[in-house]
Image: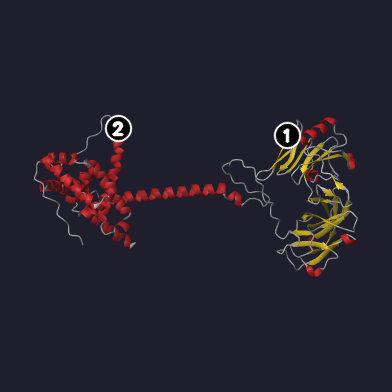
Amino acid sequence: MEQTVAADVSFDRWYRSEHSRMLALLTVVAGDADVARDTTAEAFTRALERWERVGVMASPSAWTYRVGVNLLRRRGRRAAFEMRLVRDPPRPVPPPAVDADLWAAVRALPVRQRTAIALRYLCDLPQREIAAVMGVAEGTVSATLTAARRRLADELRVVDEPAERQEVRP
Amino acid sequence: MTDVAEELRSLLDYPANAPEPVEELHRRVGVRRRRRARRRSLAAGLAAVAMSIAVVPILHRADDQPTRIATVPAPAIPAGPRLEYSLPEGWQTLYAEGNRLAVATDALSDRDRELALLTRSDASFRDLPPDAVVVAVGADPLDVKYGTNWDGSVINAGPAYGLGPERVLAGGVRFRKGDVPQSIVQIASYAGPDAPASRLREAEAVAASIRLVGAGGTAPPAPPAGSASGASAAPQALKEVARAGTGPSSVVLEADADCAYFRPAGSQPHQQGHDRLGGGCGTRPAPGAIATIGSAVLVWGEPGTAPSSATAMRVGPDVKSVSARTADGRTFPAALGATGWGVAVGPGRIVGLTAIDSAGRQTESFVP
């Protein structure tokens, strides 16, 4: 029983510290603040259900990111089917905190590029962990990030960084 | 890009993005666990119901009931030889399995049907209706279809898929015999004394329509453990419990708790297990009941005399006497020994045993 309480305390602390990052990630990936809020709650609920296993992982956050991204992917497939049936689909809700032009540019990116950008700049994950969360090779992450940055630069006319810094691998 | 990243990071600090209370997550997890437990118990209940429908009747069936399991019907592939035949109106099939068949114009008692299936030329029916006609395909393991009799007379197999000359048996029953070529079985027609001529012609048509169809062939079923004479698996240390017959055809029945075998009375006792004529194993029947142990076997007597037949039996408590009945209707007493074992030896082919208990009740057992 004591172990359960300790696990709950540990989860509570982790949940409070990770929630904003997770919500920001999923907001960018989903392009819809409301969908992101629902998916974030679902991802954390699943983490709590399996906390005995997830809590001892090297990175519980990475596991939860992956769950959230997969949930959105499934939801996106379902939504694509529903959109074909609905004449006037609901408009995505933009996050109030972000500049409208920037948000439009981010939303214009393909989902994979959005995901890579969010994991890199919101979750501060190295390429190796981004690859693990997205289920792709590290080289693919690098190429995806480069393409996303170039496209954002074109859209927003900002100067792109010369290249993604090489990370030091252990 | 740094500006873009900084702008996106503002998402992290937006006040409206405060996490929902962790208690809400705990509540959601609790609801899901309860729902999962309900599903699991429902599945367990369904499994229990399925078990009770499918398995329990198998486990709790009566000993004398066969196990029936519903299966997907497989394509009909006939196993072993089978008989094809056609029946005129008014005829019925009494028995049809493999290469044995009994059809008749009237229902027969089990004993008369078994007797007909032996296709013997000395059958004496007890309950055959006087106007009934029976056509049977079968064989008596103690008889041969071709060759010579013990007295040197030639055994005529009869016409193939037909009926030969008529012979009148006991009780006025008219008997005709035919052959099923390339097989061990033969055709026999038995007609009561009052059977109309039209029925007799129909019997000929039935015999002519019979065809034995071979389909792959199957191995004969294995005999029950210890039932083969001289079987090495059979018990060796047996004690004499009964003796029957006279002269060279007398036999000695030796038994232990659950197996009994008979051997010629004059054989060498030290060669136990190598001189057994018949017998087998079987538990003691219920009070007043009788069971045939093994099948009838031929017992040869003096040279030039007709062979006798013998069979072992076991009776339940309270059985006072047993009489053996031959195919031609003769009866003679059987010898009973300890623990219900008994043996009968007599002239002719033994086809039935009748046990009589202390109250005078009779129980019968067919001798294959």
**Where in the figure is residue B227, as x and y percent of width and height?**
73, 59
Is A58 in front, or is B327?
B327
**Where in the figure is residue B272, as x and y percent of width and height?**
78, 67
**Where in the figure is residue B336, as x and y percent of width and height?**
83, 60
- Kindly report the distance in space between the C-alpha atoms of the residues bearing marks 1 and 2: 67 Å
- B197 over A137 or under it: above or below: above
Mark 2, other Cα within 10 Å: few <14 / some 14–19 / many ≥20: few
Is B36 in front, or is B352?
B352
- B269 over B192 or under it: above or below: below
Q: What residue lies at 31% left-to-right and 35% top-to-bottom?
A: A81
Query: To which quarter of the image does residue A151 belong?
Result: top left
- B269 over B205 or under it: above or below: below
**Where in the figure is residue B249, as x and y percent of width and height?**
87, 59
Query: To which quarter of the image does residue B192 belong?
Result: top right
**Mark number displayed over residue B53:** none
- The chain holding disc 2 is A
Query: To which quarter of the image does residue B256 belong?
Result: bottom right
User: Left or right: where does residue A46 sit relative to residue B157?
Assistant: left
Q: What residue lies at 32% left-to-right and 60% top-to-bottom?
A: A4
**Mark number displayed over residue A84:** 2
Amino acid residing under circle 2: Arg
The residue singled out by tag 1 in the image is B86
Q: What residue lies at 32% left-to-right and 48% top-to-bottom?
A: B28
User: Left or right: where does residue B49 sit relative to residue B26?
Assistant: right
- The chain holding disc 1 is B
- Of helix, strand and loop, which one carries label 2? helix
Amino acid residing under circle 1: Ser
- Of helix, strand and loop, which one carries label 1? loop
Mark 1, other Cα within 10 Å: few <14 / some 14–19 / many ≥20: few
